[in-house]
Structures are given as structure tokens and as C-alpha cells.
Image (tube, grey):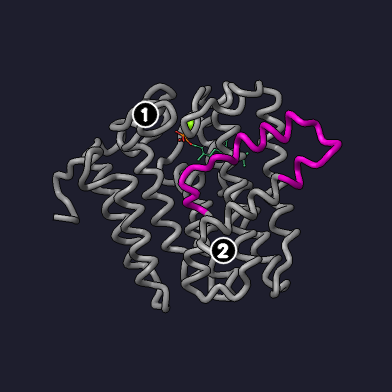
Amino acid sequence: MAMLQRIERVLEASLVGAEAKGSPPKLGQAMRHAVFPGGARIRPQLCMAVALACGDDDPSLSESYGAALELMHCASLVHDDLPCFDDADLRRGQPSVHKAYGERLAVLAGDALIVLAFRTLVGCKPKHLERLPELTAMLDQSVGPPFGIVAGQAWECESHAVLAEYQRAKTGSLFTAATAGGAAAAGMDPFAWKTLGDCLGEAYQVADDIRDVVGDVSLLGKPAGQDQTHDRPSAATLLGLDGAVALFDRLMQQAIESIPACHGAAKLRGLVMQESQRLVPTEGPHKVERRSSLYS
Ligand code: FPP
Ligand code: MG
């Protein structure tokens, strides 16, 4: 079965469990709204791609861990869109959860998705039970303080933040957890795969900053111009658009070069290049001009 199908199947099963008879129906509906239809599902796909490159000898573990990362990501977007943060009405081309279900249910849906993420991981039936504690710790570290996404978001509440630290925590931590965890789920050394996640996480946030400037609501499926509106640290503001695009290209190149030698390396390199084109294209209708291109 294809990676994406495996992830969607685990997500669906997790959601069904949370919608059981006796549970308040609107909570389950709000949780479902946050998870389906998905975005690019980049974090779980990255996790699965690394697991496959490493042999994927425990598929239940790798797909449950990947789905848990996606549930955390969805939870974080529900909270990020709330009026107390970005006050965004649109997410993935549809009303954000608080717009569709109200603020109280959006807070609760986010909370419940965090719990569901841990439940999805620890409730799976792995062949290698001994790998579960390390993966649980990775999931925990990618979300909680001091360096997880909650800490990253909390930097927005400080009067001063270092851009790299803020972005590493807010976005990079789930990417690093995806690559390192994908390897750990397959019984391989997670540290060998950390650089790939670090580079991709930073590149993804830089791309988000670029797209916030050059994109529009129809392309993004969410409001554009948010960094300026909320006066948030952004690579495009700090480095200018050309500087941010050059940084993105450099990070993607570093990501490709960091892929450890393994039988799935070529496929993984292809996936990273494809993702690079999707995020900040060098050609096509949404092409982003390069002054000094790695691709020329
Ligand atoms: C989107 O950023 C938001 C994040 C990457 C993380 C948000 C984290 C929290 C709200 C902390 C709470 C975490 C959990 C697990 C509930 P963005 O606003 O730059 O991007 P956007 O344009 O997609 O909104
Ligand atoms: Mg936002």
C-alpha cells in the first residue's frame, strides 16, 4: 500500500475511535474537520519515506508514529488559527475550526487531538515493542518545551526572539522528529537522519515565509500576508525575498546531501526535489524568480 494511503487509514481509524458512541458529537466533528481533508501530509510522508529507506521492518510502528506526528500538526494548526493567535478564518481552503465550530470547541478539539496523537502511537501493535519508548520520547520532545512546537509558538509571546531558534522549534522540531523517528521505527540510528529533518524543517518554514509574501489565498488555501499583519519574525523580512529564496535553495541542497547511503536514498532524494518544486517552484505558473539559482 502507498505511504499516503497507509497514513490516511491510521488517521481514519484513530478518528473513528474518538467519535465513539457516548462522546459529545460536535467534538468529534470538530476533530475530523481539523484532520480531513488533509494538506500535503508532508511530516508523516517524510517519516514513512525514511522508514522505507531504512527497510521499514515494523510497518505498524512507522505508520502509527507518522500519523501521530500529523495529529500533533493538525492540533497545532487549530490552536494557531484561534483569535488569540493568528485569528485566521481559512485553513486548507475551508473555514478554520473555530470559524466552523466556535472557539470553545476549537480549543477542545486541539486538546483532544494531542491526546489522540499519543494514543495512536502507544496503542499500536508493534513487532518491536522495545522501540516504542524512544519514539514516545521523540514525539513528546517535538511538541513540548523546551524546543518543541509549543515552545516555538511561545516565542511569539516574547518581546525578542532569535529567528533561527523560533523557526527550529515552531516548525523544525516536527520535521526532525519525522526523519529521526522514521529511522528509529525501522530500527536504525536516528542521529544519522537528524540533519535531513533539521534542513527540511528550516527550509519548510522559509518557504512558508516566502509563500506568505508571493502567494495568494487561492494558492495557499489560507490567508496571505500574515507575517506582516502579526509583525512576526520572517526570513523574507529579515533577508529580503531574494535572500530568503537563496536560503531555501541552499537548505534543500543540504537536505539532499545529508541523506545517508541506503537502498532507498535515490527515491528519497527524488521526493525532496519534488517537494522543493511544490513549495518554491523554479518553473510553471507559480514560478518564483531566482537571482542566483542552484538550478541554473
Ligand atoms: C503555523 O504557523 C503554526 C505552527 C507551525 C505551530 C503552532 C503551535 C502551536 C499553536 C502550539 C500548540 C501546539 C499544539 C500541539 C496544540 P504559521 O502561523 O506561521 O503558519 P500558517 O500560515 O500555516 O498559519
Ligand atoms: Mg498561522
Residue 123 pos. (x, y %):
75, 59
Q: Name the residue furthest front.
A: 1
Relative to 200, does residue 150 appear above or below in the rendering? above
Specify the label residue 104 is tagged with.
none
Relative to 157, does residue 130 appear above or below in the rendering? below
Residue 2 pos. (x, y %):
51, 62
Instruction: Name the quarter where the C terminus is drawn.
Output: bottom left
Which quadrant would residue 135 be assigned to in this image? bottom right
Residue carrying label 1? 218
Q: Residues within 10 Å of mark 1 (few under 14, many from 20)?
A: few
For the point 61% across and 23% down, the residue is: 100
For the point 58% across and 73% down, the residue is: 186
For the point 37% across and 25% down, the residue is: 228
- Report if residue 245 is visible in the image: yes
Relative depth, front residue between 1 and 138? 1
Magenta stretch? 16-43
- Report if residue 146 is visible in the image: no
- Please tell me whether mark 2 or mark 1 is closer to you in this view: 1
Indicate the secondary structure of the residue bearing disc 2: helix
Q: Earlier in the sequence, mark 2 or mark 1?
A: 2
Does residue 174 appear left or right of residue 293 in this picture? right
Task: Kindly report the distance in space between the C-alpha atoms of the residues bearing marks 2 and 1.
Answer: 34 Å
Q: Name the residue furthest right.
A: 22
Q: Residues within 10 Å of mark 2 (few under 14, many from 20)?
A: many
Residue carrying label 2? 181
